[in-house]
Amino acid sequence: MNRADESRIHALIARLCDAELTEAEAEELSRLLNHDPQAIQEYVDLTAIEFHLHRKMWVPLQTSVVSEHQLQQILSMGARSDSLVQRNSFPSRHRKSLFVAVAASLVIACGLLVQSYRVDSEFVARITDQIDCSWGESRWGKPRLDVLQEGRVIEFELGLMSVEFGKGAEVVLEGPVRFEVIDNNRGYLRSGKLTANVPRQATGFSIEMPLAEAIDLGTSFGAYVNSQGDCETHVFEGKVVVQSRRGGDSQQWQLGATQALRISKQELDPQQFAAQPAAFSNPTNLSAVAQNNVSPEVSLPANRGLTLWLEASQRIQVDSAGRLTCWGDISHGDNTVADNAWQLDVNSRPQWIPNEIAGRPAVRFNGSSCLVTSPLASGEDITVMCVFHGQPQDFPNRRAGQLINFNGPPSLILEQSWDNQFLGGVGLDPVQNLSGRLEVSLPSEERPIVCAYAYSSTTNRSALYVNGELVGKSLAPVSPAIFSTKFIGQASGQNHGFVGDIHEIMLFNSELSAEECIHISSDLMAKYGITQKDSEPRVLSGLVPEEE
Amino acid sequence: MEEERQVDALGRDKLMDTSSTEEFVRVYSKSQHRIMRFIQCLVPKYSEAEDVLQETSAILWRKWPEFQRDKDFVKWACGIARLEVFRMLRQNKKSGQYLNEDVLNQVAEAALSEAVETDRFAAGEAALKNCIQELAQTEKRVLTLRYQYDKTIVEIAEECNRPKSSIHDLLAKIRARLMRCVRRRLET
């Protein structure tokens, strides 16, 4: 049974319950139900609702099903069984008197109903963003079919999905997760993890879980349901009311910021503990890490197409084990969209090192960890600047470790090899026959390296700078332009894991001039306490084009 | 022993003692909601389901002497109700507005499984009570109009000066939402 059939079945059953089903519709419904156990269960469950609604809401109807006392009376009078066939005549009369009695309230109720229609949201919920999410046809961004109707179940194994509800609440689902949209201000977390950010107009937004319900009072909170159905609510800001749904228990707790509550099947009493924001991925709340050394700043040229800037002291999000979940893009000026780099697979997350060099943090890769940016456009002309400190002796299988890979083809790559060579170029095929290939032997000192690689297919030239020195030039005949996710620390699906620290990466959609590359390199060297040494690297390969 | 004459479905006279009558009353009154639910699953319009229930109850009473006490009464009663539904549909020639017989038989199998599960029936009812509380005020009002005051869709639409289709859609949406809510609560 697909969703279209399900919707149609619901509509037809509604008409059947309201005695409005036509003969043609009856045939259609029969056809949809025929030999489809799932559809038949849908039918049984929906008609059960109709049944219970009649029983629960129409008080006089309770007596239309004969009570034990009435039955006993009938039978004790010696009545034959046929007496039972007598119709209960009171319903219609009763209804008429009820109509008169409630006429005024009906008018008010209907007035409110009409008014309510006018203020209802246009949508129940919709997907606003996906981050490396194994759902639907695309892993990133807003999907083409973004609208989620009531009852829509979302289930995926990996990644993040932002869902905006009609009343304004935003939920970030983190895979693996199973979640259902209930209405425009309510959802059901069957299993997995989510973060809810609730603006004032959506106060009252609630997340149901198997054993509890979290009702927001204007705040930000996380919810987690494990495979046993145990439920946790973590409050990050504001207040949340948690109501138990365990058995007949309806106990309530009000949690404030930094508090968390666990309700489990095994433990009799709910457990209260400190909220763990690091356990939840929240792309809208990337924290800025306090910098020990805020100067000197790096001075960047304006209007040079800075599209990605990752700096290990800013806008990072780590999990409870100090591993990096998200490295936030701090580019500004030319770039209005943050192209954050993510790692949602726990086992592939690099470690965040708070104080690695010159009081500055670093992101440490171990050869199997990497980050992936959201898809971003890189043009005909590219400049990549990077501050890194590799440990090539630890590279897996004595191969190269890639700092960045554009995940093409064409794939612009920067990599360090196991024998301490540094290489840049643009590959058009999987075996990476590189265009604009430049290779240099790096110094072996225990200090980071600042490199700048400028590649311009429009001028057919590329240049590589190490610690502010030009170390090689080459041609650049191949366009590197591509709209793609960029891999940091490892190539996509290849054994090219980088081992070492990356402090900072900048990506410009332009060819920076030699002066600009040298100037930025100098600033970065000062920032990370890197001094110029006599034994700077020498060019190993690269065809130096004629001076223009 | 106090006795009364009873005519069974085949027209045979049977002697029914008071204790047997009391037993029937006790068993039937405990089960009638579930039998009614089974019938309503096949004949969703509540008033028609009530008619079938009353016919069925008469037959159950007549056949009570034949009922083997070690068997499941609800299952037995639903079997009779099922036949009564088909008889009613054929007699009234209303089958055009209902599912065809083949599909009704499939539905009856599923409904029978539900009817004999006493706990689930009660739990579903309790869950619905909570789920109704979760509805918006507007939605509760519509349910009140429809089920408590037994308004038809047309009546609600006229009184609210709204298109019939919008009331219809809203009710369908509420039912579906309640169904999902009940399912969730029964899962736990």
Image (cartoon, coloured by chain):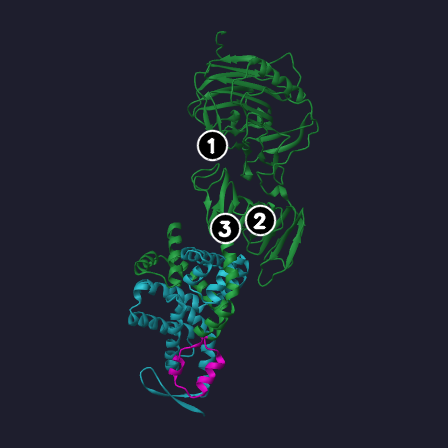
Chain colours: A green, B cyan
**Residue type, label 3:** Arg
Mark 1–mark 2 Cα distance, whole angstroms, equals 31 Å
Residue A262 against residue A339 in the figure, above or below:
below
- Residue A94 % position (x, y): 47, 73
- The reply to whether the magenta stretch includes residue A445 is no
- Marks 3 and 2, Cα distance to the nearest angstrom? 35 Å
Count of numbered marks? 3
Name the residue nearer the viewer: A363 or A54: A54
- Which numbered circle lies on residue A224? 2
* Chain under callout 1: A
Q: Which residue is mark 1?
A: A493
Q: Could you say which is closer to the camera, residue A251 or residue B145?
A: B145
Q: Secondary structure at mark 3?
A: helix
Foreground disc of the pair 3, 1? 3
Residue A79 in magenta stretch:
yes
The mark nearer the N terminus, 3 or 2, is 3
Q: Are marks 3 and 2 on the same chain?
A: yes
Residue A399 percent coordinates (x, y): 51, 25
Residue B88, image x and y in percent?
32, 72
Judged by depth in the image, the label closer to the viewer, 3 or 2, is 3
Q: Is residue B188 left or right of residue B69?
A: right
